[in-house]
Amino acid sequence: MGCEACVAECPHQALYMNDEGQCNVLENDCVDCGQCVDVCPVAAISLPQRAESKEQSNNTSDKNVISENKTEEKAVKLEGDLSKYQGVWVFIEQREGEIASVSLELLGAGRELADKLGVELSGVLLGSEIADKANNLYQYGADKVYLLEHPGLKYYRTETYMQNFVQLVQKYNPEVILMGATTTGRDLAGAVATDLGTGLTADCTALDIDPEERLLLATRPAFGGNIMATIVSKKHRPQMATVRSKVMKMPKPIFEQQGELVKVDVEIDESQLLTKVREIVQQAGDKVNLQDAEIIVAGGRGLGDGDNFKVCYDLAKSIGAQVGASRAAVEAGWIDHKYQVGQTGVTVAPKIYIALGISGAIQHLVGIRGSDIIIAVNTDPEAPIFKECTYGIVGDALEIAPLLKQPLQQLLADKKAS
Ligand SMILES: Cc1cc2nc3c(=O)[nH]c(=O)nc-3n(C[C@H](O)[C@H](O)[C@H](O)COP(=O)(O)OP(=O)(O)OC[C@H]3O[C@@H](n4cnc5c(N)ncnc54)[C@H](O)[C@@H]3O)c2cc1C
């Protein structure tokens, strides 16, 4: 049906849409991983080799059968016994002792969920020599902080973090766990949910509570972004969700707020672990920091061609903004993917988002809804972006963008002075 969900999912860029809007495969690039099969909402894709090998492995692999049973055993089949599971937890991600901002944003979201459930909000902080960071977490809403300190937890490793996190869950039985949809959070959430045999909704754009059933209502785009699905985990606990940075608002810290520190004993036997961190190599890259940008000037297909992207760079330079782009502009080869804003790009929350020649497809809008002000320039007065923006200008972006420089510079100067 041409939803492109498989194209977005393919880790090897082996799928593309042809001129008739159908999906084609580049056979030399396809490695038969099957991710497209799993993501297709209408079961339109099949891999004969994969079906065969699955059958074979079902017949021969004792190991798999054992691990499946193990997961089944651990899975909590709820039959009315909800009272055992209480509390909302947020995994507090840190690197070199610095707390990830998404964890603080999730404390804000977790606070609201915990209040609706009438339970405590806890942060779970793993690392080495990081006890002094706990205070910070109370200020952002945590009633309690579980602190797991050990030299072996200094750097994130799936095994050590997953094992310790799972043990903690099994001891204290939280009903909701939130993690940032960062590289670390995605890895840990998947590992923890799999080990506990519970449900995980990834990349949520909204979270709420059904107070009667005490269910986490986790909303995220589904079927290639064509619908927003609210997903619940009715029979399993804890209910888990990951959320990307900047999707939730950063709560205002309340500096006098205090909480309870629970120090958890940690034992790590390095000889039993498969991974060791030998060295951390920090490499300076060509950094595009869209997530933290206060002003973004983004260009879309409406700019007409790559050279016209200059209007974005010029305007951005004159007002100290970061440049962004729609997926159509990225796919046209006008700008690198790291500039892409939206569902399969970066979620942003600037003070001002300027969209030049961008129609406002849902997959783009989900990435910009955290913006304080959206200014859209589009030649089509019916463009969907005009329903979402704060200020809309019907006109040619190539003509309008240069005219925005002066008033925006003035506005920023006035703001600075006041
Ligand atoms: C699974 C999936 C994931 C996706 N993820 C993303 C994502 O992360 N980010 C994203 O952006 N998209 C994403 N998309 C694509 C999305 O659906 C749209 O196709 C895309 O956002 C369109 O980009 P656009 O607005 O630049 O182009 P178009 O939709 O082609 O819009 C161009 C707009 O420019 C206007 N225009 C034309 N000329 C001018 C002019 N001279 N001046 C001003 N306006 C002009 C037109 O009226 C039109 O509204 C995804 C799609 C799928 C299926």
Image (tube, helix red, strand yellow):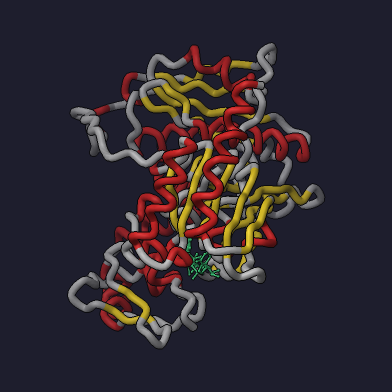
Q: From the viewer's side, name the closer residue of 374 and 64.
A: 374
Q: Residue at x 71, y 48 (%)?
A: 208
> Is there any visible trace of residue 200 in the rendered image?
no
Q: From the viewer's side, name the closer residue of 241 and 303.
A: 303
- The image shows residue 254 at horizontal and vertical percentages of 68, 18
Q: Residue at x 19, y 29 (%)?
A: 278
- Asked if residue 311 lies left or right of residue 201, the reply is left
Q: Which residue is drawn at 65% across and 30% down?
A: 251
Q: Which residue is drawn at 21% across and 78% down?
A: 27
- The image shows residue 95 at horizontal and vertical percentages of 38, 27
Which quadrant of the structure image shows residue 267? top left
- Asked if residue 287 lies left or right of residue 359, the reply is left
Q: From the viewer's side, name the closer residue of 129 and 289.
A: 289
Q: From the viewer's side, name the closer residue of 249 and 256.
A: 249
- The image shows residue 315 at horizontal and vertical percentages of 46, 45
Rendered view: 306 above or below 317:
below
Image quadrant containing the C terminus: top right
- The image shows residue 39 at horizontal and vertical percentages of 45, 70
